[in-house]
Image (cartoon, rainbow, N blue to C red):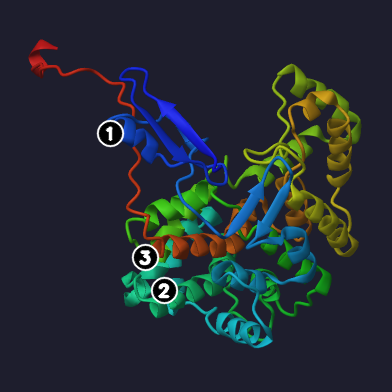
Amino acid sequence: MPDTITITDDRTGKTVTVPITDGVFPASAVRELDPSLYIYDPAYMQTAACKSAITFLDGDAGILRYRGYPIEQLAEHSTYLEVAYLLLNGELPDAQQLETWTDDVVHHTFIHENMRKRFVDGFHYDAHPMGMLVSSMAALGTFYNDAKDIHDKATRDKQILRLIAKMPTLAAMCYRFSVGLPFVYPNNDLSFPANFLNMMWKIGDYDLDPRLERAMDVLFILHADHEQNCGTTAMRVVGSSHADPYSSAAAAAAALYGPLHGGANEAVVRMLSDIGHIDNVPAFIEEVKGGKGGRLMGFGHRVYKNYDPRATIIKQTAYEVFEVTGKNPLLDIALKLEEVALSDPYFADRKLYPNVDFYSGLIYQALGFPVAMFTVLFAIPRSVGWLAHWQELIGDKEQKISRPRQWYSGSEARDYVPLSSR
């Protein structure tokens, strides 16, 4: 017998029965009961606004899969560009497809000279790199007149390719402008992560350790997509108006810019710095438990109620990076904090476990990135997830322009009062 749910409107006695599929039932059930009846769901805690075949996330079990593939396997065996192909196309590429895709990306990494010389030079000298990146992503679309032709697949594919390829170039450009360094052009002979690191750090000769190149690739894989988070939802909402992908992605990046979304790893680094020494960890934990001002950053997640699978991978990656760069002095504090918190029933009972942000900031620091670049580093790989969802949205015939309902709580009708009588 199929799973169903029956809802009765006690005001009228009317009843409706609808199917439950994969734990989801259609909101049309409420409309059938009463077209003027709405569901109040702040922050969409219990609302599925779309169907998606891209990323599976089981927060209770600590599972993350891209197109069915466990994140652990992809992080160990794949590359970011291979994962990008998977997210966009639904299947892993064969050797020829991967070669063609990689070659296409590599040869679209350059940006228009007017973008660099005129647009970027208009920013204040101390502009935040993420603010520059958000603006640059939107501006990039103005260089391609066909960007708005979103219903032509060949044109869509071209814009997706351009944006993925140019994200590292834009990010490095924003950073070097913010510190007064000359722009470094892309090098088509390098891999995707190596090219980005070269554009970031090259001053004279620059020799990149392959372990750092691989660490950057793994970080890109882990951040490529994460289901219907705030940024992805922004991408879908703006995309539902049939805006071009550059404008939609800029909106997603703006959402990521918010400290509650993309700023968690920055907050972890600040927390560890404030703790200062492993001897101070127990006292800090007690402050957190007592609500005396301390806040445990990098633990817990809106979706995960178990150990974030990305956190395990990123912790191992941190050790591999530190073999090259030397250990980040904050690592010992992080390890002690994790040990104490995980052994304390207070955190276990609340299902607070380390998430991907707990160690990523330490890696970024070890690689030389300033805190202001952390969210930019998040945006580079997440762009492919945004674009995969945008592409899926455009092809979904059930989707319309996003327009949630509201629960009006304001004044009833009243007459205007002249200024002299107020």
Q: Kindly identify which residue carries mark 1.
A: 35
Q: Kindly identify which residue carries mark 2.
A: 156
* Residue 112 quadrant: bottom left
* Residue 173 quadrant: bottom right
54 shown above or below 296: below
Of the numbered discs 3 and 2, the one sitting upstream in the chain is 2
Amino acid residing under circle 2 = Arg
- The answer for how far apart the CA atoms under marks 1 and 2 are is 37 Å
Q: Are marks 3 and 2 in contact (CB under 8 Å)?
A: no
Q: Are there few (<14), some (14-19), or many (20+) residues within 10 Å of tag 2?
A: many
Marks 1 and 2: which is nearer the front? 1
Tag shown at residue 244: 3
365 shown above or below 165: above
> Is 216 left or right of 255, judged from the image as shown?
right
- The answer for how far apart the CA atoms under marks 3 and 2 are is 9 Å
**Residue 332 placement (x, y as % from top left):** 89, 43
Tag shown at residue 175: none
Q: Quadrant of the N terminus?
A: top right
Amino acid residing under circle 3 = Asp
In this view, the residue in front, 392 or 266, is: 392
